[in-house]
Amino acid sequence: MTLEVRDLAYAYPDGTQALFGVNLTIARGERVALLGPNGAGKTTLVMHLNGILTAGHGLVRVAGLQVGKETMGEIRRRVGLVFQDPDDQLFMPTVREDVAFGPANLGVRGAELDRRVAEALDRVGMRDAIDRPPHHLSFGQRRRVAVATVLAMDPEILVLDEPSSNLDPASRRELAEILKNLDVTVLMVTHDLPYALELCERALILSDGVIAADGPTRDLLADEALLTAHRLELPYGFAIPASGT
C-alpha cells in the first residue's frame, strides 16, 4: 500500500476542527480524485501527507513509513505536492534552476542532476523552456513546470491541488494528457468533476472532515442525491458517459 491514513483528526490552533477521523488507503499506481465542498478539509488532509501539518490524532504512512519528525526528509521526497498556484512553487531565475532545486537539496549533482531536470521537463512537454525565466511563461506552462519540479524528486505519490483551475481549454487538455501518462500514484484534489472522471477511476468525497463516500468515480458522479448532499455539482448539461465509451 502506497498511502495509508488511519483515524486522522486535526484541529487548528484556534480550535477549529478540520478533520474528524479520516481513514483511507491508496495503492501503488492508483489515480484517485479527492472531492468535496469548500471547507470540507481537503487541503488540511493533503498537507498531512508530506508533513506540512502533523496529526493531532491518528497516523499517516507512506510506503510503510509513518509521517513524523524522524522520517520527514524521506516522506517529502516520496510525496510531491503541486500547489494550486504555480507561482508558489517557482521562484528561481530559470526553469532549469527551479526544476533542479529539489534534487540539488538532496545532494544530487552533475550529470545525474542534469538528467533529472531534462527528464522531468520532457515528461511535461516543457524541455524547450529549460533556460527561460518562469515568469515569461503562460499560466498553463508554469503549472506544467511546477509539476516537473516535483517529478524531478522522483516521488512515489503526486498530490495535485486543483490542477485544472484557471486553465484555458487547450491547457486543461494538455495537462490531462500529461497526467494520464505519468507512472506515479496520483491523488488529485479538485472541484472539476468532469476532470476527475477523465483522469481518476476512483474518487473519495471528503465532507465535514470525514470520508463520506469512496468508490468508482463514475458511480459517485452518477449519484445525484450523493452530490447534492455534499454540495457538489456537475456542469450544466454534462452527462455521465455510458460505461465503455
Image: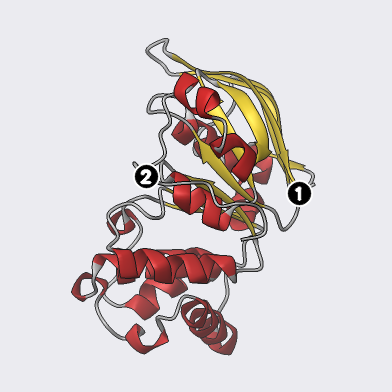
Is 180 placed left or right of 60 in the picture?
left
Q: Is residue 96 above or below residue 234?
A: below
Q: CA distance from mark 1 to mark 2?
A: 34 Å
Task: Tell me the residue that label 1 is attached to.
Answer: 27
Secondary element type, mark 2: loop
Q: Nearer the viewer, residue 163 or 71?
A: 163
Location of the C terminus (image quadrant): bottom right
Image coordinates for residue 132, horizontal then vertical, percent? 27, 83
Image coordinates for residue 152, horizontal then vertical, percent? 54, 71
Q: Is residue 194 above or below residue 236?
A: below
- Furthest residue in direction left, as rendered: 136
Asked if the residue under mark 2 is in contact with the one under mark 1, i.e. CB atoms within 8 Å, the reply is: no
Image coordinates for residue 76, horizontal then vertical, percent? 58, 51
Which residue is at 43% across, 18% downward?
12
**Mark sitting on residue 237:** 2
Which residue is at 46% across, 79% downward?
121
Q: Nearer the viewer, residue 198 or 63?
A: 198
Amino acid type at image mark 1: Ala
Which residue is at 36% across, 43% downward?
235
**Mark sitting on residue 214:** none
- Res. 75 visible in picture: yes
- Res. 4 visible in picture: no
In front of the other: label 1 or label 2? 2
Amino acid type at image mark 2: Gly
Residue 143 placement: quadrant? bottom left
Secondary element type, mark 1: loop
Of pointers 1 and 2, the one earlier in the residue sequence: 1
Which residue is at 45% across, 74% downward?
100
Mark 2 crowdedness (10 Å alpha carbons): few <14, some 14-19, many ≥20: few
Q: Is residue 36 above or below residue 244?
A: above
Image coordinates for residue 105, horizontal then vertical, percent? 51, 65
Mark 1 crowdedness (10 Å alpha carbons): few <14, some 14-19, many ≥20: some
